[in-house]
Image (tube, grey):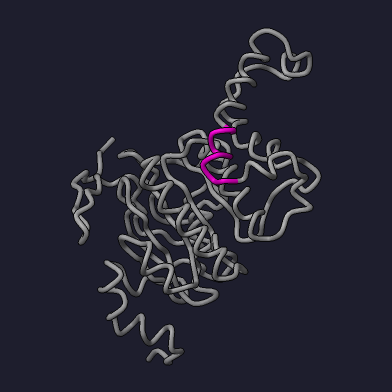
Amino acid sequence: MNVVNTDGYTTADGRKIGGVLMEMKNITLRFGGVKAITDISFDIRDGEIRAIIGPNGAGKSSMLNVISGFYVPQEGEVWFKGYKRGPMKPYQVARLGIARTFQNIALFDGMSVLDNIMTGRLTMMKSGILGQAIWWGGAQREETEHREKVEKIIDFLEIQAIRKTPVGRLPYGLKKRVELARALAAEPKLLLLDEPMAGMNVEEKEDMSRFILDVNDEFGTTIALIEHDMGVVMDLSDRVVVMDYGKKIGDGTPDEVRNNQDVIDAYLGVAHD
């Protein structure tokens, strides 16, 4: 297999970003006769925070679903860690080191915070159903090890006080944080965040922004996020790719994107010729 270009780059504030971790090459996704994504290419570099933005209906979530394996594009190639990735199920993609959160919270309301986060470790568990049922020997040791990892994430995200609380009783902002914790429990190399701050108040957005930066800094996790709050995007992101009507209309640093006339037109609702 051919290996993609691995050159890194340095951000404006002097942070070192590694080589290409994921590359989307000429991705086209259709639903019947409707094109959700049309011939889009971009890459995600190791260690960066990469934003995917655009107006409603631009195809952002569809792109995230292609990255995470929920959708298989009709055209184009997905490369990860230097190798072309064939069609895969979402659980297979997760095993590669890609985890995600969802635009609409996808947690188990009747389960505790701790148990919800533990589900993020499922792809790493080796003991069978029988061993887990009797909870003996290797299965017991394995679960203990996984719980220790989860407890560290609980401490990191400052949710110790709610660890035994059923998720259904939590306010919206805390549910979002629990979903982030579950994704982190999978120890991803690439973390996909689909509108992590949607519906949050100012204080909740500030907390989530801080945690995203901390995850990137302390764990070295590469992050790709979809977000509508442009203030958040410009503050957090190293690079931004902009979509509109399923096409890429901008790609670069926050400053480059901010001054891109096509991007300005898209967000102001200016009609395209």
In the image, residue 174 lies at what x, y percent? 65, 55
Give the number of callouts: 0
Taking the spot 58% from the left edge, 64% from the top edge, the residue there is 31
Snapshot quadrant of residue 128: top right
Snapshot quadrant of residue 38: bottom left
Of residues 92 and 125, the one nearer the viewer is 125
Taking the spot 40% from the left edge, 53% from the top edge, the residue there is 213
**Residue span colored magenta:** 150-158
Q: Decide whether residue 165 is among the magenta residues.
A: no
Main SS, magenta region, reads helix
Horizontal side of residue 56 vs 45, given as left or right: right
In the image, residue 33 lies at what x, y percent? 56, 70
In the image, residue 263 lies at what x, y percent? 36, 80
Taking the spot 57% from the left edge, 42% from the top edge, the residue there is 90
In the image, residue 247 lies at what x, y percent? 41, 72
Of residues 83 and 129, the one nearer the viewer is 129
Return the residue found at the far top.
137
Horizontal side of residue 239 vs 96, given as left or right: left
Of the 4 image quadrants, the one containing the C terminus is bottom left
Of the 4 image quadrants, the one containing the N terminus is top left
Of residues 250 and 102, the one nearer the viewer is 102
Look at the picture and state if 233 lies above or below 224.
below
Taking the spot 63% from the left edge, 41% from the top edge, the residue there is 160
